[in-house]
Amino acid sequence: MHQYEKKIYSQNGEDGLIEEVFKRIGVINKFFVEFGVQNGRECNTRLLRERGWNGISMDRDYSGKYIHKVFITVENINNIFASFRVPKEFDLLSIDVDGNDFWLWQALMNYNPKCVIIEYNSQLPPNEILTIPYRSDFKWNKMPARDDFFGASLGAMIELGKKKGYSYICVNEVINHKYVNAFFVKSEYICKFDKIDIPMVTYDRYYHDENKYKRLIDPFKLQDIGAAKIIK
């Protein structure tokens, strides 16, 4: 899939990958939901909107003509989707919140996008199942030192996808030479894609706090979401 990467408004080639995915699997209603769009200038769905798609763009800190300022948590995500009248079946869900991405996808119930794009932490071993514990007010420490304690490993995202009926197809890696977003499609469409190789490399860490790293967890070993609320 990497030959299809193309950047118009996306950060790391997602525009081209999205285009190719929907060439292969088709569309339902040309509807998207993306949260974590910042000011909307550089995001995964701006090009789709300009091509006639409809959808909901949300961000924790920004608002604008097409952007709703919404703070999404595990506790409110389904109510937010209902309040915006998101169709139960739609085409694309894009999640990029620099932290609770795994937990938000896990918490979303009864909504079935054909394709999911979700940010993962490429600093974590991709063959391990790891995520930060859930905390509703978690915010990634970008500055002054870019903390690498955020998000979940690719392995955790792949396992969650399986449990929700999705198959992993690729990550972006060519443009900007960064592994950032993982792409999934509903498993019924995996036949449209070639054999998938999971990248086994990681990039140089940001500022690494070993004490925080030791507090990463395997989310599938928790009895309930409350057990994960242990970040301080």
Image: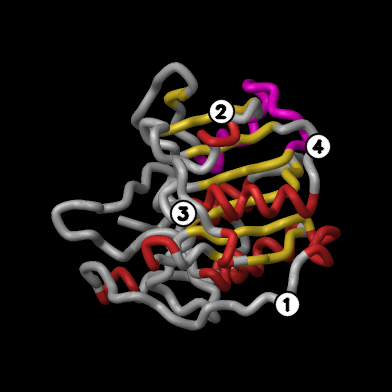
Q: In front: 161, or 18?
A: 18
Q: Which residue is mark 1?
A: 195
Badge 3 amino acid: Tyr
Q: Earlier in the sequence, mark 3 or mark 2?
A: 2
Q: In front: 130, or 119?
A: 119
Q: Earlier in the sequence, mark 1 or mark 3?
A: 3
Residue at coordinates 57% horizontally, 73% vertically from top-left? 155
Q: Earlier in the sequence, mark 4 or mark 2?
A: 4
Residue 144 image offset from top left, x and y in percent? 14, 54
**First to last magenta residue range:** 73-90
> Is 187 drawn above or below residue 202 in the view shown?
above
Residue at coordinates 27% horizontally, 73% vertically from top-left? 211
106 to the left or right of 37: right
Q: Which residue is mark 2?
A: 50
Badge 2 amino acid: Glu
Badge 4 amino acid: Ile
Q: Which residue is mark 3?
A: 134
Instruction: Give the mark toward the camera: 1 or 3.
Output: 1
- Mark 4: few/some/many CA within 10 Å (<14, 14-19, 20+): few
Looking at the picture, the colour scheme in use is secondary structure
Q: Earlier in the sequence, mark 4 or mark 1?
A: 4
66 to the left or right of 184: left
Give the structural element (helix, strand or loop) at label 2. helix
Give the structural element (helix, strand or loop) at label 1. loop
